[in-house]
Image (cartoon, helix red, strand yellow):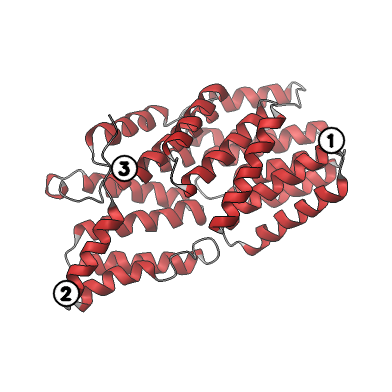
Amino acid sequence: MSRHYIHIFQWVERYYQEAANQFNLDKMLLVETFYQLRHSAETHPEIYLATMERGYLMAQQLGEPCWRFFYAYWRWEVLMLYMERQTEGLKFAIEMVVEARKPEYAHCITRSPLFAMLVDSYVLVDPIGYEDAIRETSRYVEDELPISHQTHCLLLRRRAELEYALGDLPTAIRQTEQLLDLAEKEPFQQMYAYEMLCHYHHLQGDRESARRYANTTYEISLNLARKSVIMLACAWQALFFRQDGDISTAQSWYQRAESYYQSLKMKAALWYFDILCEYHEIGGELEAAWTLRDRQLPTVIGTGGYHNEIVCRIKRASLLGRMGRAPDDEIAMARQIAPHLLRPDAYLAQLDRIAAGDDRV
């Protein structure tokens, strides 16, 4: 039996129509504020954040808790996904979920995205440490709350990312394939599923599948004008053509990826730098790879995303080993991050292997 989904944007449209019929300008403005600069988060995240915060305050002043929850989600999204303010985003998610659990808000159609954003926050900050909370909150949302199709897709996506962080690549692939099936008629969700499958199949050494998924990711992201994903797709193409030995075409794709990177105000996904570093390592250009890791480091330091920060340090230490340089300082700095993680053992084991001379971690 197919699941019944709620439709939050139909609720938005009905609210606006009712406000227009009553000529209630305050309520009309409450809706219209959301659509101001709606697609500017990638290029102007600070302005987008200010707009969402304005909507949040308007909802509070109008005594509209469901709209406050609505704006809370989009405020959180720009904080976590575009500005990488992970500590602030996690704190805000917890506060909003605590409030959304109150019985007086049970009628709000906009509650379930708040629980999904908490799952998101856990995955982005410390997926291994918050594993139990991620699984429990996901089950609660799916079993106990009315949810939208988008929220369901998001939960599947984050569970796949959890399995990847835990090192279970086959399960991560199965979860992502489920996401792809669920997102059959939603190009936005399909785009992320295809990019994830490209990444996972590449790690498995399945070059043919990875390339096929990269091509599809590129096509969909172009149609959706999603610059951050176009950037990733271009980076994948650069890597694959470099593997083919077609240096000229590879360089062209590389330059396109970097051009998109420069046009974005948001921080690139962790594996954007992984792809480009591998591109250089194929050609023995280890110094170029190190320069990229130096570019990456400031994007993860001080955000509160401790998983990304320690993974970046681990990859820097591993690269130093391949360059014939001592990784001791990087290992030491990585170990300083470990106390911020709830379950750091897997990360510390990787550092121990690098310290013992294994530079392929």
Left or right: 349 with respect to 259?
Answer: left
Give the crowd class for mark 3: few <14, some 14-19, many >=20 residues within 10 Å. many
Q: CA distance from mark 3 to mark 2?
A: 33 Å
**Image x and y of residue 33, in percent:** 34, 71
Residue 138: give its label.
none
Residue holding disc 3: 115
**Image x and y of residue 215, in percent:** 66, 43
Give the crowd class for mark 1: few <14, some 14-19, many >=20 residues within 10 Å. some
Q: Earlier in the sequence, mark 3 or mark 2?
A: 2
Quick check: marks 1 and 3 in contact, CB under 8 Å? no
Q: Quadrant of residue 208?
A: top right
Mark 2 element type: helix
| 3 vs 2, front mark | 2
Residue 54 appears in the picture as rendered: yes
Residue holding disc 2: 21
Q: Earlier in the sequence, mark 2 or mark 1?
A: 2
Q: Nearer the viewer, residue 26 or 313?
A: 26
**Image x and y of residue 55, in percent:** 31, 67
Does 321 sit above or below residue 78? above
The kind of residue tagged 1 is Met
Residue 323: give its label.
1
The kind of residue tagged 3 is Phe
Q: CA distance from mark 2 to mark 1?
A: 69 Å
